[in-house]
Image (cartoon, grey):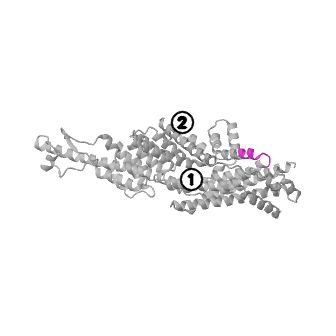
């Protein structure tokens, strides 16, 4: 054995347990992190809700604009994703959209040309959050920042026509929209409808269908499908109600059932109930077995 | 003279390319841009806008980081490693040294910017977003923003440590994007002194907002050629002025 061999210290043989220990600890560490996160999530509000609450600290988007410097559009995109998440979560739970208007106000202050945000924000605010005035405010802000865009005055006209019943404003806004570059050719057709104050179902259905075809936003499409179903329900109720009124006028009594209206020729057939329920007579009024909560939410 | 400047520039370029920070930043930028693919299904019809915004912003942000982090230590490193003695012992004037350093760093930025832009267009192709050539205008304007910012970083690098230089350059970057507030203050304030000071600072500090046209190119808004040309001219004049100050400061230093 020479000197080199004597001075060589044989390497310590580490057991397989020692070798595996760091990997095992890391895996257990992640399991621990996962369990903690589960526990944190179960304590109450999730991250999504906190994000929205954090936005509430900003009275408007002006403060955020300054912080975001030249990255305002990216901040706006992030808030857009937050808004979609907030809307989707509340649509599936309590259907209360307390912060929706605020979120869209901040979003559009950061990116004043984000037409998709004005469009989606206004429609959801008007129909789901039942805040048409807030929706119109959002759209008018958008019109100030984007005076040549046709979609925003169209949406404002649409809300005035369908929800508020201000037909003069609706006609004026449709006129403005029709003059803008790239406007739908159909917009101009809705000016006389609005002026004639005609709230017929076919026109409303056509408007919703146009909106449906114009967007790739899945959430917005779901809202439109809900509105189209609701419209069909309203149309069915109105048809049967008219038949009941005619029956009472001619027969001097109320019909026993809706089938009697069909049997006696007052109604061609019983309209389809779009939510899977059934129409029935409640005295001289026509009603449906579908509860109002289902009419508002289900697709 | 030009040979000496190009010598320093080429060396700076080669040295910076070996810098791991640069490579890491380029890789992170491309990963961030590719991250847009994940956002696509949840963007609700706005994926195209988000992918473009994210890509162009990542290019700017990571290039700014390169300019600040690499530029901030570009001169200081030579002093710290004492390689400056070797350089200045040769017939290289301090003016040539500073200009060479600046040009070298600009070359590095152009290469990293080009790589990130190629990455961005690849992301557009992968995500099936129209790769409009018009988007390149935003990158071109970023080059001129970076030139100005690099000159700021080189100036600080001549007399403060890299960390201090990075902090100061970031401050200038942040302020440079908020100078319009000074103009608003001047318009709103009834006091002539406040008006004067606000306007003085508005024209003195670099206005980096001039170079941000990303919103315009993404939203398809018309670009104003006169404004673009004037902004390019502004960048050139401001950059030259800052480099002159940097040369002046560097000339006064004793080694």
Asked if residue A286 lies left or right of residue B124, the reply is left
**Hey, which quadrant is residue B140 in on the image?**
bottom right
**Hey, which quadrant is residue B11 in on the image?**
bottom right
Q: Report helix, strand or loop for mark 2.
A: loop
Where is residue B29 shown, x and y percent of the image? 61, 54
Where is residue B202 shown, x and y percent of the image? 68, 45
Magenta segment: does it hold B197? no
Q: What stretch of residues is rendered in magenta? A: B158-168
Residue found 17% across the figure and 52% down from its top: A268
Q: Which residue in the structure is indicated by mark 2?
A: A57
Q: Report helix, strand or loop for mark 1.
A: helix
Relative to the observer, which residue lies in front, A55 or B200? A55
Q: Residue furthest left?
A: A251
Where is residue A61 shown, x and y percent of the image? 54, 41
Q: Which residue in the structure is indicated by mark 1?
A: B54
Where is residue B194 shown, x and y percent of the image? 68, 37
Residue found 85% across the figure and 57% down from its top: B87
Label 2 – label 1 distance at C-alpha:
25 Å
**In the rendered image of this protein, does residue A48 appear above or below residue B32?**
above
Magenta segment: does it hold B159? yes
Relative to the observer, which residue lies in front, A122 or A99? A99
- Chain of the residue displaying label 2: A
Residue A140 appears in the figure: no
């Amino acid at each position: 054995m020479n000197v080199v061999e004597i001075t060589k210290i044989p390497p310590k043989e580490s057991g397989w347990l020692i070798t595996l220990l760091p990997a095992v600890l890391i895996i257990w560490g992640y399991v621990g992190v996962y369990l903690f996160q589960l526990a944190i999530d179960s304590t109450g509000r999730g991250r999504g809700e906190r994000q929205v609450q954090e936005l509430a600290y900003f009275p408007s988007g002006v403060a955020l604009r300054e912080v975001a410097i030249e990255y305002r559009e990216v901040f706006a995109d992030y808030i857009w994703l937050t808004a979609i998440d907030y809307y989707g979560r509340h649509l599936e739970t309590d259907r209360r959209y307390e912060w929706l208007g605020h979120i869209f106000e901040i979003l559009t202050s950061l990116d004043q040309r984000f037409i998709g945000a004005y469009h989606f924000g206004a429609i959801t605010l008007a129909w789901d959050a039942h805040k048409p005035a807030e929706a119109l405010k959002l759209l008018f802000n958008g019109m100030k920042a984007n005076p040549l865009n046709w979609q925003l005055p169209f949406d404002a006209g649409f809300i005035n026509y369908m929800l508020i019943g201000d037909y003069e404003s609706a006609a004026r806004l449709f006129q403005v929209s029709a003059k803008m570059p790239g406007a739908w050719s159909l917009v101009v057709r809705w000016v006389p409808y609005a002026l004639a104050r005609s709230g017929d179902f076919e026109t409303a259905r056509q408007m919703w269908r146009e909106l449906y075809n114009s967007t790739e936003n899945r959430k917005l499409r779901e809202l439109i499908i809900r509105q189209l179903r609701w419209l069909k329900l309203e149309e069915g109720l109105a048809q049967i109600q008219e038949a009941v009124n005619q029956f009472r006028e001619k027969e001097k009594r109320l019909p026993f059932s809706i089938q009697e209206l069909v049997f006696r020729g007052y109604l061609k057939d019983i309209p389809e109930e779009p939510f899977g329920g059934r129409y029935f007579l409640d005295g001289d009024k026509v009603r449906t077995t579908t509860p109002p909560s289902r009419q508002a939410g289900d697709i | 003279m030009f040979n000496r400047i190009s010598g320093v520039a080429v060396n700076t370029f080669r040295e910076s390319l070996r810098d791991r920070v640069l490579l890491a930043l380029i890789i992170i930028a491309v990963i961030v841009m590719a991250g847009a693919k994940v956002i696509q299904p949840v963007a609700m019809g706005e994926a195209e806008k988000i992918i473009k915004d994210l890509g162009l912003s990542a290019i700017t942000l990571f290039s700014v980081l390169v300019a600040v982090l690499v530029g901030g230590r570009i001169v200081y490193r030579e002093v710290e490693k004492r390689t400056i003695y070797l350089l200045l012992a040769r017939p290289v004037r301090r003016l040539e040294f500073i200009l060479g350093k600046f040009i070298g760093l600009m070359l590095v930025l152009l290469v990293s910017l080009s790589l990130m832009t190629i990455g961005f267009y690849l992301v557009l192709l992968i995500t099936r977003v129209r790769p409009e050539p018009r988007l390149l205008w935003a990158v071109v304007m970023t080059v001129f923003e970076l030139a100005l910012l690099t000159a700021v970083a080189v100036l600080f690098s001549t007399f403060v440590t890299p960390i201090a230089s990075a902090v100061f350059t970031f401050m200038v970057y942040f302020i440079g994007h908020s100078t319009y507030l000074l103009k608003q203050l001047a318009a709103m304030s009834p006091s002539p002194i406040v008006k004067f000071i606000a306007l003085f600072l508005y024209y003195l500090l670099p206005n980096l907002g001039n170079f941000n046209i990303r919103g315009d190119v993404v939203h398809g808004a018309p670009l104003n050629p006169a404004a673009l040309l004037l902004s390019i001219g502004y960048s050139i004049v401001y950059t030259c002025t800052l480099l002159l100050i940097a040369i002046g400061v560097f000339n006064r230093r004793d080694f």
